[in-house]
Amino acid sequence: MNEDLRVVFESRNRQSCADRALVLTSIQIPHQLVDDGASCALVVPASVSARAMTEIQLYDEENPPIQPKPVQQVEYQNAVPGLVTYVLVICLVAGMAGYSFFQSNWFTAGRVDGELIRNGELWRLFTALTLHSGVKHLLSNLVFGIFFGLFAGRLLGSGVAWLSIVLAAATGNALNTLLLESTHRSIGASTAVFAALGIIAGYVWSGKLMAQDRWSNRYGPIVGGLALLMYTGTGGQNTDVGAHLLGFVCGFGAGLLLIRLGDIPKDAKTQLLAGATAFGLIVISWVVALVV
């Protein structure tokens, strides 16, 4: 190619030049790739440069560059009020139950009891979430509850997060009771802890808050949630695996529902109302449990 040459395409991406060179090859336009290491140029004889540029333009119009999907921007909320309330409620109930306040056996009054729940004592679905069998049980649920509650509160706001957690956990307790024998009994906030984990997984996955191009990213929140469930929720002789699993499943469903409901109000009034409702459900349930 000794005649006058014209540059018809230039790019730092050699593959882009090679693709357009194939276009020129297919229509038998003589061309040459010039690569200086920093960029690549496609040159043709001046006599066919106009035709070459037209063909390259047509190729570009038929093959627009793939635009990466924009990553959803998350506006993180203040999770501290919900975490503080969670710690206070769990510790306060632990202390009052340990000293049998109001001359009542809090464990008998508030634990999950399959037979009694089936007979209508639905408040146990909530009260059992605040009872623990010992210091180790209490500390474990405090640590994991704070950890998962932090992420849930940051995503949804303290009030909405904990109202969702309480309702999902109570639903998990109800399903666990229906699926097991009527003699089933259990206590502990672990159902709520795994409901929080499920809410995070369901909300992040359904809301596409992670990059969705690769399958590993699309299903990452689900896989991660199940992995944490398997790692932290299936060990120990007295572990209620069913409650943990159903807490996670109900939480996951709650996360999906929250996405379907649309934008969650982030204002302080809505968050306070939701948080007060969650707190009220626990308090009213305990009042009923200790009075009946």
Image (cartoon, grey):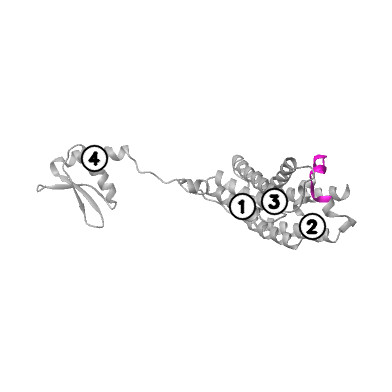
Local secondary structure at mark 2: helix
> In the current view of this chain or complex, which residue is farthest to the left?
2
Q: Which residue is mark 3?
A: 192
Q: Which residue is mark 1?
A: 230
Q: CA distance from mark 4 to mark 1?
A: 54 Å
Locate residue 24, reporting x and y percent.
21, 40
Q: Earlier in the sequence, mark 3 or mark 4?
A: 4
Q: Nearer the viewer, mark 4 or mark 1?
A: 1
Mark 4 surroundings within 10 Å by alpha-carbon count, few (fewer than 14), some (14 through 19), many (20 or more): some
Q: Identity of the amino acid at label 4?
A: Val
Q: CA distance from mark 1 to mark 2?
A: 28 Å
Q: Earlier in the sequence, mark 4 or mark 2?
A: 4
Q: Which residue is mark 2?
A: 93
The answer to whether the residues at label 2 and label 3 have Cβ atoms under 8 Å apart is no
Q: CA distance from mark 3 to mark 4?
A: 61 Å
Q: Identity of the amino acid at label 3?
A: Ala
Local secondary structure at mark 3: helix
Q: Earlier in the sequence, mark 4 or mark 1?
A: 4
Is the residue 26 above or below the residue 124 in the image?
above
15 vs 226, left or right, is left
User: Visible in this render: residue 214?
Assistant: yes
Q: Quadrant of residue 31?
A: top left
Instruction: Please give the range of residues in magenta.
Output: 109-121
Name the residue rendered at 63%, 58% in the picture. Answer: 147
Q: CA distance from mark 2 to mark 3?
A: 15 Å
Q: Earlier in the sequence, mark 2 or mark 3?
A: 2
Q: CA distance from mark 4 to mark 2?
A: 75 Å
Local secondary structure at mark 4: helix
Mark 2 surroundings within 10 Å by alpha-carbon count, few (fewer than 14), some (14 through 19), many (20 or more): some
Q: Which numbered circle lies on residue 23?
A: 4
